[in-house]
Image (tube, rainbow, N blue to C red):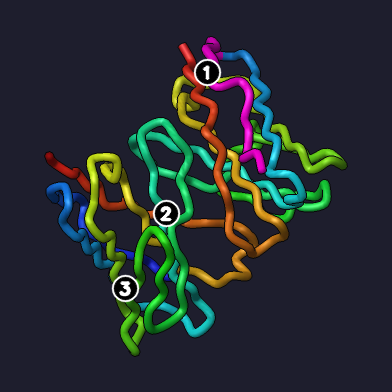
Amino acid sequence: LAKTTQPISMDSYEGQEVNITCSHNNIATNDYITWYQQFPSQGPRFIIQGYKTKVTNEVASLFIPADRKSSTLSLPRVSLSDTAVYYCLVGPQAAGNKLTFGGGTRVLVKP
Amino acid sequence: KAGVTQTPRYLIKTRGQQVTLSCSPISGHRSVSWYQQTPGQGLQFLFEYFSETQRNKGNFPGRFSGRQFSNSRSEMNVSTLELGDSALYLCASSLFRDETQYFGPGTRLLVL
């Protein structure tokens, strides 16, 4: 499974857009990029998944450049409740449900 | 639709004891995976069950075991507990294998 690198932490303010970039230089052809959000003492929550270009849902957008060696999760107009750890995962959909989590990015949204 | 439920939510045990944790997947989901989360090691995959069979296993000692029932509910067992087993144990379910996993709230285990 491809190794991912993301910033350890980021600070932001309410109403701002937060962009978290994840590097995955060794991404394989059949790998997908998935982001999860986790609040303290809770299980991770699926946010978004993509393979290439741009994916958008009601929560976030995921931007993937043509070479797919990185991806950026974009959270529009964050609120205090978006304070959480965000994990970038890369792997084939046929990973046998064996998700490999890295260290994640701790996002702190300030008032 | 109800989410993944895990029982109990909190548990305190002493070294040497054994513990059983339970997970009820989202209705209709057939795959259940277990993860351990600790401050030092982060989130680590334990094992995956589908159709009552273990399909994948992480790098954990044999003290960690699990099973899945015909209704897709799953249990994991840890025998001869050690202090290092203190962690948040998370269960995730998906409709089939290789699909998006949805996590439960976890069981926080404290070993004294």
* Left or right: where A88 falls relative to B77: left
Instruction: Between label 2 and label 1, give the one nearer the viewer.
Output: 2
**Dot 3 corresponds to which residue?**
A71
Q: Residue furthest bottom?
A: A66
Amino acid carrying mark 2 in the image: Tyr
Q: Quadrant of residue B66?
A: top right
**Residue A1 visible in image:** no
Question: Residues under labels 2 and 1: Cα distance?
Answer: 23 Å
Q: Using the image, name the chain to which the residue with label 2 belongs.
A: A
- Give residue A25's quadrant in the image: bottom left
Query: Is B104 one of the magenta-colored residues?
Result: no
Q: Secondary structure at mark 3?
A: strand
Q: Report whether B68 appears left or right of B81.
A: right
Residue B20 against residue A59 in the figure, above or below = above
In the displayed structure, B64 sits above or below A75; it is above
Q: Is the residue under label 3 in contact with that under label 1 (CB below 8 Å)?
A: no
User: Residue, x 24% and y 62% (percent of image)?
Assistant: A20
- Magenta region: which residues? B1-15
* Residue that label 1 marks: B10
Label 1: chain letter:
B
Residue B32 picture location, percent across and down = 68, 47
Say few, some or many: other residues with alpha carbon within 10 Å of mark 1 (under 14 / 14 to 19 / 20 or more): few
Q: Are marks 1 and 3 on the same chain?
A: no
Disc 2 marks which residue? A36
Task: From the viewer's side, name the closer residue of B22 and A27.
Answer: B22
Q: CA distance from mark 1 to mark 3?
A: 36 Å
